Amino acid sequence: MDSFWIIATASLVALSCSFLGVWLILRKMAMLGDAISHAVLPGIVIAFLIYGSRDNSIMLLGAGIIGVFTTFLIEFFHKKAGVQSDASIGVTFTWLFALGVILVSALAGQVDLDQECVLYGEIAYVPLEKTYTLLGYDIGPHTFWLMFIVLMINILVIGIFYKEFYLTTFDTEYAFAIGMSSWVWHYVLMSLVSFTTVASFESVGAILVVAFIVAPAASAYLISRQLKQMLLLAAVFGLSASVLGYYLAYWIDGSIAGAISSVLGIQFILVFIIHLIVRKSNVKNSNYLEKELLSQKAN
């Protein structure tokens, strides 16, 4: 049963992150997830200092505010100061993450937080958490239900506002012409990324969150022709990596998060190779057809 809760929780994190990752990849903002995942550390520490509790809702609120603030700073430095986008991301998240590390180390006696736990997480401990019961039956650990709620929120927001996200991603001028505000939907997306990232910290850590945000969406991007197809494929890649990564970790007796990240990397390499082969084959077929047409015209 422990294996089931670990795989189920990893799958929920994978789905939540991969759906958001698709939009980030298409908006050329994939590394923003990495930036937010590190920059929210001071928000977590400050929330703990104010409320004196590790309650997830308080942590989510503190980290969510800092996450949105991070995207605001990145946009501000990029658009107002003319700093390149990647440089703006690098500068913003490094100093915010450094501030979080300083707060944790300086207030070590008051803050019950572990930097390694935030970075690496430990999904193997999910079955040991507090569990909920319904009608006397055990219905699973706290993190599983937290990620289930996060996934439902992401699906509802993306599903209801699919048109708004679509237009502000692919045709900002048309979206503006019909009265849609690109920055509003930008910050809605960033808020979802922030809350999803923070909710996933405790179970899988920042590094695997980034892997789940970027890798499945990047693999799906290479072989998709439509947005809905890309969303579906990203979900399939994330889910399969969760299952295969768990059993790989069990087989080698290693880290589950590390094994899942490795599987995501292998998936991307395989998809990339297949993509290259198919593209090369299409070019050959195109050249062959072109020669055939020229030959027929000559005759």
Image: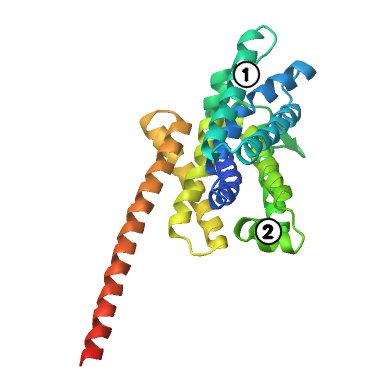
Above or below, 103 relative to 258: above
Helix, strand or loop at mark 2? helix
Q: Please state, as top left, top right, bottom left or bottom right, where the C terminus lies in the image.
A: bottom left
The answer to whether 23 appears left or right of 44 in the picture is left
Percent position (x, y) of residue 82? 59, 38
Disc 2 vs disc 1: Cβ atoms closer than 8 Å? Answer: no
- Amino acid type, label 1: Leu
Q: CA distance from mark 2 to mark 1?
A: 36 Å
Above or below, 235 relative to 14: below
Numbered label attached to residue 99: 1
At x 52% / y 26%, what residue is drawn? 120
Residue 151 in sight here: yes
Helix, strand or loop at mark 1? helix
Toward the viewer: 24 or 119?
Answer: 24
Toward the viewer: 148 or 112?
Answer: 112
At x 48% / y 32%, what residue is drawn? 257
Percent position (x, y) of residue 119? 54, 25
**Badge 2, how many Cα within 10 Å: few under 14, some, many 20+?**
few
**Which residue lies under the disc numbered 2?**
162
Toward the viewer: 35 or 122?
Answer: 35
**Badge 1, how many Cα within 10 Å: few under 14, some, many 20+?**
some
- Amino acid type, label 2: Tyr
At x 58% / y 41%, what residue is drawn? 13
Pick whichever of labels 2 and 1 is earlier in the sequence: 1
Toward the viewer: 125 or 208?
Answer: 208
Numbered label attached to residue 42: none
Q: Please state, as top left, top right, bottom left or bottom right, where the N terminus lies in the image.
A: top right
Above or below, 99 relative to 27: above
Above or below, 273 relative to 228: above
The answer to whether 132 appears left or right of 295 in the picture is right
Q: Nearer the viewer, mark 2 or mark 1?
A: 1
